[in-house]
Amino acid sequence: MTDVVGRLRAVLGDHVHDDADALARHRRDHWVLSELGDLEGTLGEPPLAVAEPGSSEEVAAVLQACRAGGTPVVPFGGGSGVCGAVVAPPGSVVLSTARLDGLIDLEREDLRASFRAGTQGLAAEQQLAEQGLTLGHWPQSIELSTVGGWVATRASGQFSTGYGSIEDLVLGLEVVLAGGEILRLPAHARAATGPDLRQLFLGSEGTLGIVTEVTLSVRPEAPARRKQAWHFADFAAGLEALRGLLAAGVRAPVLRLYDAPESQRHFAELCPEGRAMLLLLHEGAEPLLGAEAALARACCERAGGAEGAEEAVDHWLEHRNRVPGFREFLERGIIVDTIEVTSPWSRAAALYEAVTASLREIEGMLLATGHASHHYRSGTGLYFTFAARPEQASLRETYERCWDRTLRATLAAGGAISHHHGIGRVRREALGKELGPEGVALLRSLKQALDPEGLLNPGALIPDARPAEATTP
Amino acid sequence: MTDVVGRLRAVLGDHVHDDADALARHRRDHWVLSELGDLEGTLGEPPLAVAEPGSSEEVAAVLQACRAGGTPVVPFGGGSGVCGAVVAPPGSVVLSTARLDGLIDLEREDLRASFRAGTQGLAAEQQLAEQGLTLGHWPQSIELSTVGGWVATRASGQFSTGYGSIEDLVLGLEVVLAGGEILRLPAHARAATGPDLRQLFLGSEGTLGIVTEVTLSVRPEAPARRKQAWHFADFAAGLEALRGLLAAGVRAPVLRLYDAPESQRHFAELCPEGRAMLLLLHEGAEPLLGAEAALARACCERAGGAEGAEEAVDHWLEHRNRVPGFREFLERGIIVDTIEVTSPWSRAAALYEAVTASLREIEGMLLATGHASHHYRSGTGLYFTFAARPEQASLRETYERCWDRTLRATLAAGGAISHHHGIGRVRREALGKELGPEGVALLRSLKQALDPEGLLNPGALIPDARPAEATTP
């Protein structure tokens, strides 16, 4: 096995690391069960090495070197995932995209920009901002995650209701396939040239190829903003307002509805107790900007909303990316996580009620709350947060119970088991239920076609027959 | 071979046709080379039979019956394609979706509607209109094409700039796979649950599975419209105006720019000679509607446009789906066709000039003109029309020369070889150039994974090593 490391060094020189620190930093993402395993010292043997190729050709060489030894390869972008897509098994090699960095090309007239896959999200936005441009893609992980990671996980940003999720922004891709072939899918505004091959890699979580370059659609920075805050009798009333906003054609980049507990948690001074807060952030140029704000106001009034202080939007803008780490909770015996799903509008209020009520029944539950922050004409993303300090059950058992109840309720409501965090390991079994046996068979046949030896990120995403203990930390 | 027909009759009873009329009506689409072959009597032997299954289970049974005999299956929707995706070879069975008809379910709150694949486009819109809803998908073929055909060909409608193309509308799909498995991909507003499997079938042109049911996103019918017409010094100036409109966030459903010859052809009275006409149709509710129209007006003025009579928009609305058939031209020794491609904005004017100039050099060329009618922040669809009455070359040679020059120029400009008509047979070779060897290999590996025996619509879409004579009429 270790001759793989030798072969990698022959290709990459010093850009192969096998010191304990590098292995510890790259063996996993932020999945809370990995965090827990780390705390408990149960993660087991680390991977063999971390390889940092500096070009697509070097990525191909890494894959070929690993293939020759039958060595699994775990791609690693920013490591900001929360579902366990990165759990590098013993004997594997982690392929970090850290050196595949930077803006390659900016085509101003065509409003598109090409980045190497390892470009860190905020750096990408900053390079565009110098030109008065933006992607409009602002995941909470923007300071950690990478452009390639966004593609691999089908990411959504906080402004997605107006500007789209990553699949709406990707124009072209370069991907290195399992056999080392470098595939370039050209950047087109739109095409009817067979199936959209880019879509194989969007959401593939490193199991079908390594994304090395991404061409994204960009837009001029919005010249102005308008902010509004409204509050509603309850979460269901707020959802009804949102449904109306979307049906009326309001595409404000930010529309965030919090249930009553979250409204208190985040905006105590700014929202009457027991009410559900809705934040609106409009962006653009007059006269469209003012027209959209006026239309939104009419929709909120019609839905029984009461206007609140727009300072709530500023407060959100300032604090939006500050999230406490899981670790500090775990150390206090508390298990915390978030679960986001997609629901049709017609089931959203009932699904919210069913999930929060069901979570609150679990022993030691401290809080089970929700918000809705990504919307479409046909449905919305529901984002649940729970925290529990169980006395009888273990943290792990409690955790699994929460996930199981939430995903079961989502499947029963005809929802999607993930809106934007992805599958990783925590949702792998539920994905099988969502896709059904025919869908799972199709996904496996794609895996077989693209990675017949099964070396790309084994254990993530694809429901299969491996024993669970080999794929969880 | 004929025992296939017996097996089909055992499953479908009277819904298997092998009379000359049924075979003639289902053996091909509207591809002009098929039209020419028909006129010249060179189409050769027809397929064995036309099977009309009435349910997904019957579609599965048809595929199984054909598979048992190694019989190729050619799916047939409305037959309105113009690129030769439907050319049923001798010994094949045509699977018509005609009996898979009608609205299955309308979920008003979720703004989604499920149709059987064979539902004719205008019938689908009419059923929705009764509820005050619309898809907003209006291909010129709306009276001929089917919902399933839209998916199989990655169709765009005339209102796509505002309302999206078919891939933006498809929420859920049911597909029968080559082995007869019925795959249901659930309707979600958005999901991060692995690669988007629906995308395998969008644009697959019947080569990867048979679409049997489609869930589409619908929208309330727009309460009001605004119309504008502007004219510009030339096509390039009009393109520049369009680029500005899209960058500014104008998403009017219809923005149509015609070059000077087409402006004269369609709007003689309404457009000064030598000028390029731009039609704008805005839809929606106040105050957004008025704001968008005002912003568009400012963009057109800034780009040097002069305002024209909005009657031009009414004229287009009335005449938009009237197209003369190819046949009447062929009978007069004239070959006519249209070729649509996608270009980045930065290359669009030059590509338009290069293609029209190059076509005009061809012997016997009567006209070579263009318009642009589907737009994106990063580029636009260019739609070329040519007509030639060659004296020396054959109609077929002239035709191939036109296509070859147009697609070569498009590839050289970094454009996509089809915006929305698809690949069929006429672009199959060029698709190989656009995708490159790695892309072709990937497409073939998908074909191998989904249809290992190669029985689904052989000869369409996928560049391969078959001799050309087996796949052209």
Image (cartoon, coloured by chain):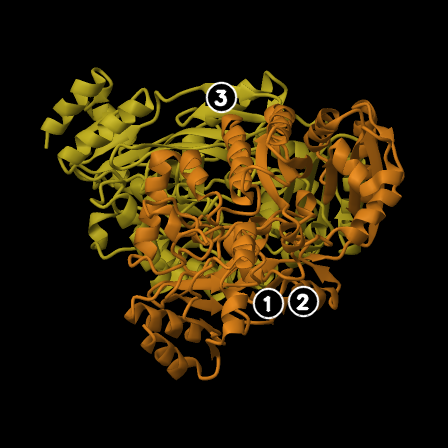
Chain colours: A orange, B yellow
Q: Which mark is residue A282?
A: none
Q: On the rendered structure, is B13 left or right of A24?
A: left
Looking at numbered disc 1 in the image, what kind of residue is underneath it? Thr
| Mark 1: secondary structure | loop
For label 1, the residue is A119
At which x and y percent is residue B161?
62, 43
From mark 3 to mark 2, how far is it between C-alphas? Answer: 50 Å
Identified at 31% across, 59% down, the residue is B441
Q: Quadrant of residue B62?
A: top left
Residue nearest the viewer, comparing A136 with A463 = A463
For label 2, the residue is A123
For label 3, the residue is B123
How crowded pointer 3 is (Cα within 10 Å; few <14, some 14-19, many 20+) is rated as some
How crowded pointer 1 is (Cα within 10 Å; few <14, some 14-19, many 20+) is rated as many
Q: Reply above or below: B125 against A204.
A: above
Residue nearest the viewer, comparing A390 with B156 = A390
Looking at numbered disc 3 in the image, what kind of residue is underneath it? Ala
Is residue B325 among the parts visible in the rendering?
no
